[in-house]
Amino acid sequence: LKVIGVSDEKNAVGKVKDFVRQQGDRMTYSVAIDGGVKNDWFTAAGQKGIPCAFIVDDTNHIAFIGHPMDDQFEDILGKVMEGRYNPKLEKQAAPMLDAANRAARVKNWSDVHRHLDAVIELDPRVFLSTSLRKYRLIACDQGDAEGAKAWAGEMLETYASDAGGLESIAELTAADPDACVHDLETARAAADALLALEGARDPDALATSALVAYHSGDKDRAAKDQQMAWMLVEPGRKDIFKRNLDLYLGGSGRQRAR
């Protein structure tokens, strides 16, 4: 993710530099002075209020225009960063998702599955959240452990080459607040597939493996994997990894990492 802030103040290089300097660590992104951006982006988009954020995906298409505190902003940003945002497909899926919701209210599970499957078939990567929703529905709403296990197996195949998908499956089945979705065998299978896909020195794959180990009661492996992840991750993310390392070390009997 690259963030660029643009000031529309003209002939104010010194003023803008002083402002950024005063912000210190509160403003860690690049700041530019308007060289036509306001006219070509802000005005062209019919915007009037500030701040105004534009999210541009990796195909140079604008995925979002509006206030960064808008309810949709973080959801769309996350999807764009994971390559899962496709407004055309989401518009196509909307009536099917509405139909699934109506069927779920009357517990017509076969209709729910039919509509959710149709959405997923549009693009499993874009509709990862729908795949996960179907798993939760089978496991919790229907209370069908065998059916949930079968769908989990299908998800592992569908997302075998999707690192974000494998990570989401592992997190859901190991650490979700709802115990009805827990399946530690599936979680470990997803974590191991992620390690195989990304490599045994990928910090996110290691952290996912550590999470699964921790919730499976293997505190020693959790501490070992998380310590390696913490050592390998880039400096800007070490604090987050360290918090989990401290948690895992607290129950493992291992010495604290130095």
Image (tube, rainbow, N blue to C red):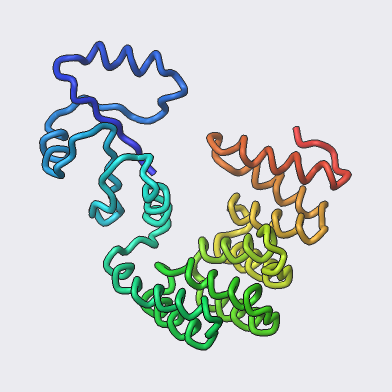
Residue 176's place in the image compared with 230, above or below, is below
In this view, 168 is above or below 137: above
- Looking at this view, name the residue that lies furthest to the front: 106
Compared with residue 149, is residue 45 higher up or lower down, i.e. above or below? above
User: Nearest the camera: 173 or 144?
Assistant: 144
Q: Is residue 141 left or right of residue 246?
A: left
Tell how many labels. 0
Report whether 67 appears left or right of 107.
Answer: left
Residue at image coords 14%, 15%: 11
Rendered location of residue 124, percent (x, y): 43, 74
Q: Quadrant of the C terminus?
A: top right
Residue 80 spot, x, y in % from top left: 37, 55
Residue sitting at x 26%, y 12%:
15
Tell whether 213 sits left or right of 61.
right
Q: Nearer the viewer, residue 131 or 67?
A: 67
Q: Position of residue 215 (x, y in %)?
A: 76, 58
Q: Going 76% across and 55% down the picture, which residue do you hit?
A: 214
Q: Hey, which quadrant is residue 235 in on the image?
A: top right
Give the quadrant of residue 84. Answer: bottom left
Q: Residue at x 64, y 84 (%)?
A: 147
Please provide percent x and percent y for residue 120.
Answer: 43, 77
Indicate the quadrant containing the N terminus: top left, top right, bottom left or bottom right.
Answer: top left
Nearest the camera: 185 or 223? Answer: 185
Question: Left of 48 or right of it: where is 73?
Answer: right
Corner quadrant of residue 197: bottom right
* Residue at the limit of the structure toward the bottom, as seen here: 110
